[in-house]
Image (cartoon, grey):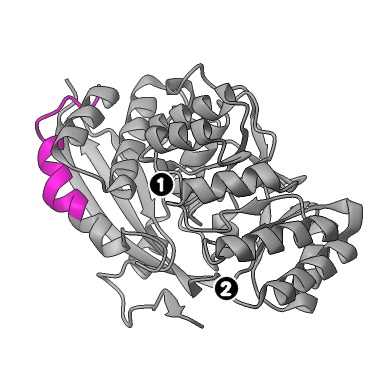
Amino acid sequence: MAMLGRADTFIVDVPTIRPHVLAMATMHAQSMVIVRLTDADGVEGIGEGTTIGGLSYGEESPESIKSAIDTYIVPVLETCDLALVGATMGKIAKCVRGNHFAKCAVETALLDMAGKRLGIPASELIGGGRVRDSLPVAWTLASGDTARDIAEGEAMLEARRHRIFKLKIGKRDVRDDVAHVGAICKALGDRASVRVDVNQNWSEAQAKLGMAMLREVGCDLVEQPIAGDDVTAMARLSQTQAVPLMADEALHGPRSALRIASAGAAGVFALKIAQSGGLFATAEVAAIGTAAGIGLYGGTMLEGGIGTAASAHVFATIPELAWGTELFGPLLQTEEILSEPLRYADFSLAVPPGPGLGVNLDEDKLAFFRRDRTAPTLHAVTAGA
């Protein structure tokens, strides 16, 4: 049996390379909850729980993720054989309701530990195992300034780092947003795929207008234009608009995926390990999407290196990933907390090949960015900026 020896959770705050403008907030730093579990034999597993903009995005924050793990999940881990990842997470599910981000962080650490113990990558513990070694990666153009976004897109194409671009819109008038997107589509032409993310900020009427106009200017995909809990309206839009609608905030694991698929409410699923409740649950969401003929896209919560590596291991097991991935989170941060950064080249991310997640932490960077060890504390968002 692999019994818990030690559990440590802490928050790190890492600045972003530029303000990251979303419909609900503007990020100036990313706050990540890091989980380190060590079994009685000294085998360590690491995980990450990361959301966007504190509580401005969803119901979990860095502070609540840490509290849920420390107060409610660790006592359960103390009663489990950590080598049995599925059984351990099943027991946690019975004892802790919701808290998908916290559970994902713990499951990630358990899979990292299991892979290290067995000497195999985490991807080999999920589904049928790895089917690809690299993943195409999108970049989000989110400065809000058209000229700056075009220049940034051109630089990414020149460096062969990204040729899929997602634009964050929804704060301005619909027509102004479409004009912004249209200018970028025209500038980047057929060299790149341009998509948008509205982050639920449109009404159904605005979405009907916006999606029709976006198709005309060359936009390939519209992510979560309206509230994620309005599946009926999503279905109306999906069935009447030519540009595909991608479900994101509407997805919270397999049950929600089945409801959306049954209603015909999306043409694409944005897979997110934290939002789904873990790596195993994400694989189930992907299977439901595939069975329903829904396209798949590997999404992100702008995780750092740990969460991005964990996502990559899941996405590497999915046979059909037609819309690529968005695993650029570490590239948005000014500093890397891994001892060896993930490898981005030729428009793709290489899936780490080593045991477990295949990544290790930089202890000096952790000591510097840990919220409980450094001052002053960085502020992750400016709401409404």
Q: Residue at x 66, y 53 (%)?
A: 222
Mark positioned earlier in the residue sequence (1 or 2): 2
Residue 231 in the image: above or below residue 182? above
Q: Quadrant of residue 273?
A: top left
Which structural element holds mark 2?
strand
Report the residue marked by disc 1.
Answer: 275
In magenta, the rendered stretch is 68-83
Residue 174 falls left or right of residue 283: right
Q: Residue at x 16, y 33 (%)?
A: 94
**Residue 120 at least partly seen:** yes
Kind of residue at badge 2: Val
Residue 95 drawn at (x, y percent): 13, 37
Which structural element holds mark 1?
helix
Q: Quadrant of the N terminus?
A: top left
Report the residue marked by disc 2.
Answer: 21
Residue 384 drawn at (x, y percent): 48, 81
Q: Main secondary structure of the magenta part?
A: helix
